[in-house]
Amino acid sequence: MPDPKNLPWPEGTRLSTLTLATAPGTPLPRHEVRVRPLLPLWPRGDVLVMAEPVPGQPIAGALATFSHGLAEHALVSRGTGDELVVALPEDSTAWSDPAFLELLAAAAQGAAVAPRSRGVGLLGFGAIGAEHARALRETAGLHLVAVCDRDPARASVALASDPQARVHDSAEQLLDDPDVEVVVISTPPDSHAYWAMAALERGKHVVVEKPMALTTRECDALIERARRDGLALSVYQNRRFDPDYTVIRDAVRAGRLGEVFHVETFVGGYGHPCNYWHSDAAVSGGALFDWGSHVIDQVLDLLDGDVDSVTAINHKRVWHDVTNADHSRMTLHFEGGREATFVYSDLAAALKPRWYVLGTMGALTGEWRRESVVSRNAVGTLDEDVLAPADAPPRVRLHSPVGDVTELAFRDTEPHPFHADLSLWLQYGFLPRVRGEQSRRVISMLEAAEESARMGGMPVKPS
């Protein structure tokens, strides 16, 4: 039987007394098994794992089951004391599967954890607030209890979908609500640090919309306060889970490109920036902060190693009624000479690829798609709503050294991975994939980029 101490459990797992036992019987051939967790408030749904399950175990009291033929069989059951009985052979490949071990860890800790759902308050209810509200409705272990927005119409939208939620007239009222255990902050970026600290000071767990803050000093203060008080602090880096990024990440980590040494990323087009806070550098942090907080997070997740310096240039040439740069370019110079460049532009009449990734054994490109929504208008003629390139995931293609090109298919993913991570973090202590310290590193790169741009593109070492 595998020694629990030698298995790659999720970070934050507490299993000092766990023992594992295998169920008797003949295993089935290795195949993809759909595991159905029966744990209270499990947030991820079914788990798919390559395994060799042993059928025939009774499902009474099971913690997870699988199907064989037309019957359900127990895959994980509780034995005596802290023992888990797992219907797998000792040499099963499932013992190294992170998703399966996460389920096992939750099953093991379930006896010591009283499952309960955490109440969440949404501070700000724009488009991203509606996205959070939907995720809370569909993620076990979290539920919406309160909303605050300066626009009464937005609060009404929230109540239409979640009539049980309370609407608060002020942010302070929401933060003082005793039923709010987690605060999601979706205010403009220049207020992120203020409201996050106010929530932490009241003992609330905090999720901040990106960017985490506008300075690393603010990030450090938030991280230290959360660590001191044992509170969860994360940033909604939702594009870490975008289908184009995840298929690129998986290809790179599988070694399909060899050693990756050059990355280019691009977002933009040609058009007038919005006349909202996104285009006000004092509020948003600037063009690089607005989209760069997404893209640089992806780059730092994709490439290992330290960043030696950052260089950047901002152009202000056409759109003089907004304070964001019209065109911005920043480059991360990694140790060993590897580079990653991000360009954001409102002056790009010709689009660069969303992704251009070079490795020693191949390349990846992410080409923008031109999509539209076609409908019939009131008089019966065609209406066509052309989407902005960034509103559809790009097509990702793998290029071999001999010229073969393969389009990589996106895979089905869980609907709300960030919120599922948050639920498991609060329930069992499993550390999430997006952590405050990672988002702080993103801010350090953006901060260095803005400093470099002010100095005409001189290299700046991130803090």
Image: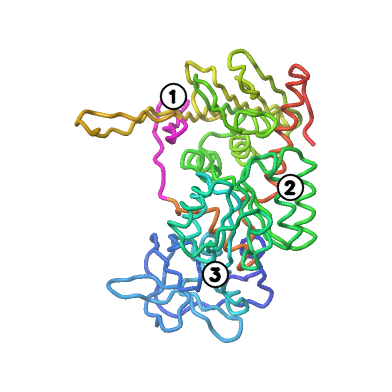
Kindly indicate the quadrant of the structure image that contains residue 202.
bottom right
- As rendered, which of 405 and 61 lies closer to the eye? 61
Q: Amino acid at mark 2?
A: Tyr
- As rendered, which of 326 and 360 lies closer to the eye? 326
Task: Residue at the far bottom: name it.
Answer: 80
Q: Amino acid at mark 1?
A: Val
Residue 194 - label? 2
Residue 21 lies in the magenta-colored region:
no
Q: Residues within 10 Å of mark 1 (few under 14, many from 20)?
A: few
Kindly indicate the quadrant of the structure image that contains residue 261.
top right
Instruction: Say which residue appears at 77% left-offset and 23% top-offset.
Output: 459
User: Which of the two marks, 3 or 1, is nearer to us in this view?
Assistant: 3
Instruction: Say which residue appears at 35% left-offset and 75% top-offset.
Output: 72
Question: Which residue is identified by label 3?
Answer: 104
Task: Residue at the far left: name it.
Answer: 380
Magenta stretch in the rendered image: 390-412
N-term-proximal mark, 3 vs 1: 3
Please state the horizontal and vertical placement of residue 354, each as a whole percent of the image. Answer: 50, 28
Relative vertical location of residue 43 with respect to residue 56 in this rendering, above or below:
above
Question: Which residue is identified by label 1?
Answer: 402
N-term-proximal mark, 3 vs 2: 3
Disc 3 to disc 2, C-alpha distance: 39 Å
- As rendered, which of 88 and 291 lies closer to the eye? 291
Answer with left or right where residue 208 lies relative to residue 202. Answer: left
